Image (cartoon, grey):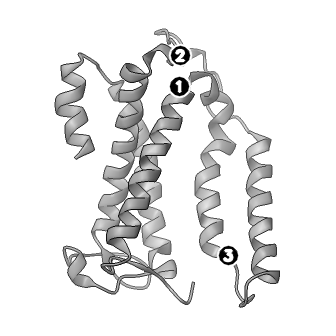
């Protein structure tokens, strides 16, 4: 619904355009990573107890098929997040957008630039999770694999691209986009996904 509303009503109504090439390049980079997460890790960390809560169509993954909605989630989820950010950045929070020039992209001689602070943060978070797992919970066995995957996926782009992207980001639009996505996610997990058995955490994670 956010995709349809933003693309077919809000953007045309406000006479706003999106940088299509950049948008689709971003989708082309992010979506395969999301699909890879589903293929390699979905059955490792999750179970899907209520088949009736989904379309009932299986998609391939290691360890057995997963609901096809898991793959649709990454495709439409990334599109929705990008569109919400663009709408906020170019309309509601346009005063805080960073002006760009036609030759700006050509001036980025190095797209990949190492950001050591992000790597240090990732190591610190994973280390803290390992320490917590070993010493604080009632069952210290195992490794915080799911948390490690989340940290790796969340901070890998920052480790590689943050120095280049930082000057071009509308941080107020990012903050509000993050708030909206977090709010939607919390409502979804608490009121639909877990109660209806869409998914549950695997006990063998």
Name the residue: 61% across, 21% down: 108
Q: Are marks 2 and 3 in contact (CB under 8 Å)?
A: no
Indicate the position of residue 130 as horizontal and vertical percent values.
Answer: 77, 74
Mark 2 and mark 1 in contact? Answer it, CB < 8 Å: yes
- Residue holding disc 2: 98
Q: Sequence order check: which comes first, mark 2 or mark 1? A: 2
Give me the C-alpha separation between circle 1 and circle 3: 33 Å
- Disc 3 marks which residue? 144
Q: Quadrant of residue 203?
A: bottom right
As drawn, 73 above or below 85: below
Image mark for residue 151: none
x%, y% of residue 194? 38, 76
Which residue is label 1 attached to? Answer: 170
Quadrant holding the C terminus:
bottom right
Residue 82 is situated, as x and y percent measured from the top left of the image, at 40, 38
Name the residue at 25% across, 34% down: 6
Q: Secondary structure at mark 2?
A: loop
Left or right? Give the position of 31 relative to 52: right
The 10 Å Cα crowd at callout 1, few under 14, some 14 to 19, many 20 or more, is many
183, 122: nearer the viewer: 183
Identify the residue at image location x=75%, y=79%: 133
How many marks are shown on the rendered structure? 3
């Amino acid at each position: 619904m956010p995709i349809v509303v933003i693309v077919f009503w809000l953007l045309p109504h406000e006479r706003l355009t999106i940088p299509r090439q950049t948008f689709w390049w971003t989708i082309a980079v992010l979506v395969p990573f999301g699909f890879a997460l589903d293929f390699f890790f979905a059955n490792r960390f999750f179970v899907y107890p209520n088949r009736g809560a989904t379309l009932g169509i299986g998609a391939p993954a290691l360890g057995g098929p997963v609901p096809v909605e898991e793959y649709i989630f990454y495709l439409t989820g990334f599109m929705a997040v990008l569109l919400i950010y663009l709408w906020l950045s170019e309309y509601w929070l346009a005063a805080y957008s960073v002006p760009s020039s036609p030759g700006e992209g050509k001036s980025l001689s190095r797209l990949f630039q190492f950001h050591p602070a992000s790597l240090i943060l990732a190591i610190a978070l994973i280390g803290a999770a390992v320490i917590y797992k070993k010493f604080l919970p009632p069952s210290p066995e195992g490794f915080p694999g799911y948390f490690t995957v989340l940290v790796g996926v969340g901070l890998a782009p920052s480790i590689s691209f943050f120095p280049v992207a930082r000057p071009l980001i509308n941080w107020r639009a990012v903050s509000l986009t993050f708030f909206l996505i977090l709010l939607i996610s919390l409502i979804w997990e608490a009121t639909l996904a877990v109660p209806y058995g869409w998914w549950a955490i695997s006990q063998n994670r």
